[in-house]
Amino acid sequence: MERFSAVIQKLALVLLLMGAVGMIVSMVLGFADVVGTKFFGWPVPGTLEVTESTMVLIVFGALAYTQSKRGHIRVEILYNYGSPRAKALMDAVTHLLAFIYFALLAWEGVSEAIYSWDIGEATMGTIRFPLFPARLLLCIGTILLLCQLLVDIVSDLGRMVRGDDATMGATTSHFQ
């Protein structure tokens, strides 16, 4: 399981870095578009379409990495008062619910990506930009998150049985 977790973490980091590159591309294009429009009267064609697609990469590229670091926001009103077993149970239930939600998202995302590929779906802007890559990245990011959630569920259940405190990347609230 540790080997599987390490592979997921490396893939999540690659996807996160791809999202960072996508963010830089979006920022540069946005800047060039504003400067080009305001000062030269020439907007950069395709800025909106590229930015829309890179947003998917930015958001879904970061989900699995953030989950691997247990960095998602959580409300700790009752959590801090629980025993290590109770905390592990709450983590397991939360991760299971997240797994179900994102499994449904992945299932629908895969069918949308297949449909997008089949019809050759593209944007309607000045530059026809294919939408399949963004839909595929949504699926990849979601499936990678599902793998990380599965690792976390197994880890949470193990902590619950042993009665261990949260380990490995678990965070506590910094806003208490």
Image (tube, rainbow, N blue to C red):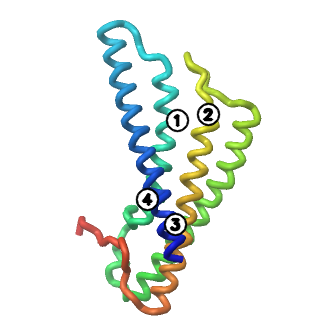
Query: In the rendered picture of this protein, how many numbered marks are placed on residues?
Result: 4
Q: Which mark is residue 65?
A: 4
Q: Residue furthest top?
A: 41
Dot 3 falls on a residue whose secondary structure is helix
The correct choice, above or below, for 162 with respect to 70 in the image is below
Q: Nearer the viewer, residue 2 or 100?
A: 2
Residue 13 point in image, percent of width and height: 43, 56
- Residues at badges 4 and 2 in contact (C-beta under 8 Å)? no
- Residues at badges 2 and 1 in contact (C-beta under 8 Å)? yes
Question: Callout 3, which amino acid?
Answer: Gln
Residue 15 point in image, percent of width and height: 47, 50
In 3D space, how far apart are the residues under numbered discs 1 and 3 (Cα atoms)? 24 Å
Q: Which mark is residue 131?
A: 2
In 3D space, how far apart are the residues under numbered discs 3 and 2 (Cα atoms)? 26 Å
Residue 112 point in image, percent of width and height: 69, 43
Dot 1 falls on a residue whose secondary structure is helix
Question: Callout 4, which amino acid?
Answer: Tyr
- Give the mark nearer the N terminus: 2 vs 1: 1
- Point out the image quarter for the C terminus: bottom left
**Circle 3 residue:** 148
**Circle 1 residue:** 53
In 3D space, how far apart are the residues under numbered discs 4 and 2 (Cα atoms)? 24 Å
Residue at the image point whose x is 52% and y is 83% from the top: 157
Q: Residue furthest right?
A: 118
How crowded is the residue under tag 1: few (<14 C-alpha within 10 Å), some, or many (20+)?
Answer: many
- Give the mark nearer the N terminus: 3 vs 2: 2
In 3D space, how far apart are the residues under numbered discs 3 and 4 (Cα atoms)? 8 Å
How crowded is the residue under tag 4: few (<14 C-alpha within 10 Å), some, or many (20+)?
Answer: many
In 3D space, how far apart are the residues under numbered discs 2 and 1 (Cα atoms)? 7 Å
Question: Callout 2, which amino acid?
Answer: Leu
Residue 74 point in image, percent of width and height: 38, 66
Within the image, what quadrant is residue 134 found in? top right
